[in-house]
Amino acid sequence: MTKHLTFSIASLLFAVFIAGCATSKDPYRNKALRLQKRLDVEDTSYLYALPYAKGKSHLVVQAYFGTFTHKNRAAIDFKMKEGTKIYAVRDGVVVRLEERNTKGGNNKRYRQYANLLVIAHDDGTRAGYWHLKQNGALVNMGDTIKKGQLIALSGKTGYAAFPHLHFLVWSNNNNGWQQVPTRFNTGRGPRYLRPFRWYRNK
């Protein structure tokens, strides 16, 4: 590892530590961590596409139930420069969209200013794409979306210390909405993503 890369990751660790996204309890913590570390293996869950262009790689700075601001979240943070193209991970319909905001930073007061996009899937799950840039949604409310379709541009709006894409999936069951760990199709094959690793979109 080069000195530059070491410094960059150390900087990211510090930034992630002081950054924040809202937290909520999730019963899948232990299961997700075992799947993430490949202590357990399963091949039945939906295989999501990575949310960026084919052939591109991005660093995961936080993964499911991470030790920083994802302690109670089955979410993934991908480090991305502002304006990076974001692609749909699955077919669905746009059910929520916010792109008017310009503010963002390392303070909870910015949480209300996050630009975001939520897409509902045919099995009842929903995927959320957070911290988009102003006017960064490239689709409209009610649009039907195809897996791999260009949908947005990344940014740093809302409660975010650096530009990144915060991604998560929810499932609605008898106990209400629960966050669901997601399995992705990567250049290394199907994976539950781990922090501080680069993943290439096939």
Image: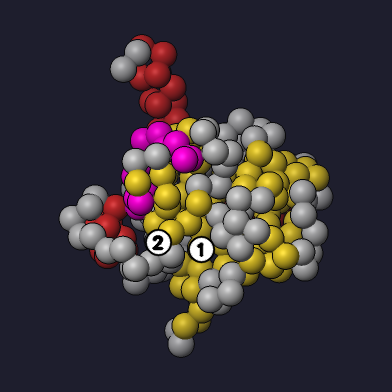
In contact (CB < 8 Å): disc 2 and disc 1: no
Q: Position of residue 96 (x, y in %)?
A: 71, 65
Residue drawn at point x = 50 percent, y = 47 percent: 50
The region drawn magenta spans: 190-202
Judge the density around disc 2: few (<14), some (14-19), many (≥20) Cα neighbours within 10 Å.
many
- Residue 132 visible in the snapshot: no
Please name the residue that numbered disc 1 is placed on.
169
**Left or right: 185 with respect to 107?**
left
**Where 198 falls versus 130 (above or below)?**
above
Residue 150 picture location, percent across and down: 68, 47
Whether residue 87 sits left or right of residue 23 in the image: it is right
* Residue at point 35%, 51% (across, down): 190
Between 107 and 121, the residue placed more toward the observer is 121
Image spot of residue 64 (x, y percent): 38, 54
Residue at image point 74% right, 60% down: 97
Indicate whether residue 200 is drawn in magenta.
yes
How many residues crowd around disc 1 within 10 Å: few (fewer than 14), some, or many (20 or more)? many
Res 181 label: 2
Q: Is residue 15 above or below residue 185?
A: above
Which residue occupies 55% across, 47% down?
51
Task: Using the image as rendered, state which of residue 84 and residue 174 is in the foreground.
Answer: 84
Q: Indicate how the structure is coloured in the image.
A: secondary structure
Amino acid type at mark 1? Val
Give the quarter of the image for residue 162: top right
Q: Amino acid at mark 2?
A: Pro
Residue 190 position (above or below residue 196): below
The outermost residue toward the left is 39
Q: Secondary structure at mark 1?
A: strand
44, 158: nearer the viewer: 44
**Along the polypeptide, which appears first: circle 2 or circle 1?**
1
Q: Give SS at disc 2.
A: loop
